[in-house]
Image: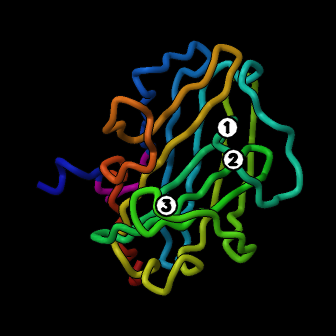
Amino acid sequence: MLEDRFLVMTVEHWIDLTCHPSTRPATVRAIAVLVRRSAGAELRMTFRLDGDIPRIRIDPPGAPRIATQLWRHTCFEAFIAVDGQPAYHEFNFAPSGEWAVYAFRGYRDGGPVANETMRPDIAVRSTGSRLELDALVRLDCLSAIHPRASLRVGLSAVIEASDGFSYWALRHPAAKPDFHDPDGFTLLLEPPNPQR
């Protein structure tokens, strides 16, 4: 049954990520994501991290630029696949404004895409107890199909803190954290209704 495999978005609401059971940080209380898909081929995500922000490693903000291995530090991620297809894209969003995009033909079969036209818009707000990162992805930069297709999305976060790393996702299908596992792409986004 569809509802058993996927979280189908029908109204906007915050979606909780869960921490992988192999990591139990004291510094992070919760991570939630608000996802909005527009008729204008945009996917907007707000990642909200509640915790002891001064104890979390966050690089200072800088000019937006492509970077590598962002997942080695605090980083928010989105995995986007057209429903029914093995290919997917991975977006990494760092609080510094750095970003990365990867294209895969199937499970971990691919690599980085160094294309400035795919640059997401990133904005960050932070207090002592909350960090929010807004990311906007243009689906028409992925392919002509993405704006009109049903999408399977995986949302995740790697958090580096003074008490170690923690790994957060919509679903953790494996014994070890693996955000590329397609069984973790559990958010189903239907095409927007152009009448709205």
Name the residue carrying label 3: 36
Q: Amino acid at mark 2?
A: Gln
Q: Residue furthest left?
A: 1
SS class, disc 1: helix
State the image coordinates of residue 82 (x, y, percent, origin top left): 37, 71
Any mark on residue 88, and which?
none
Does residue 168 show up magenta in the picture? no
* Main SS, magenta residues: loop
Q: Which residues are magenta?
A: 8-13
* Colouring used for the render: rainbow
Contact check, label 2 and label 3, Cβ < 8 Å:
no
Q: Is residue 136 left or right of residue 43?
A: right
Name the residue carrying label 1: 72
Q: Amino acid at mark 1?
A: Arg
**Residue at 71 percent of width and 77 percent of height:** 117
SS class, disc 3: strand
Judge by depth and name the residue closer to the eye, 102 or 30. 102
**Residue at 59 percent of width and 79 percent of height:** 141
State the image coordinates of residue 105 (x, y, percent, origin top left): 43, 69
Of callouts 2 and 3, which one flags the residue occurring earlier in the amino acid sequence?
A: 3
Contact check, label 1 and label 2, Cβ < 8 Å:
yes
Q: Is residue 39 left or right of residue 130?
A: left
Any mark on residue 69, and which?
2
Q: Is residue 73 above or below residue 25?
A: below
Q: Give the Cα distance between marks 3 and 1.
A: 27 Å
Quadrant in the picture for residue 9: bottom left
Of callouts 3 and 1, which one flags the residue occurring earlier in the amino acid sequence?
A: 3
Quadrant in the picture for residue 63: bottom right
Name the quarter where the N terminus is drawn: bottom left
Q: Give the Cα distance between marks 1 and 2.
A: 6 Å
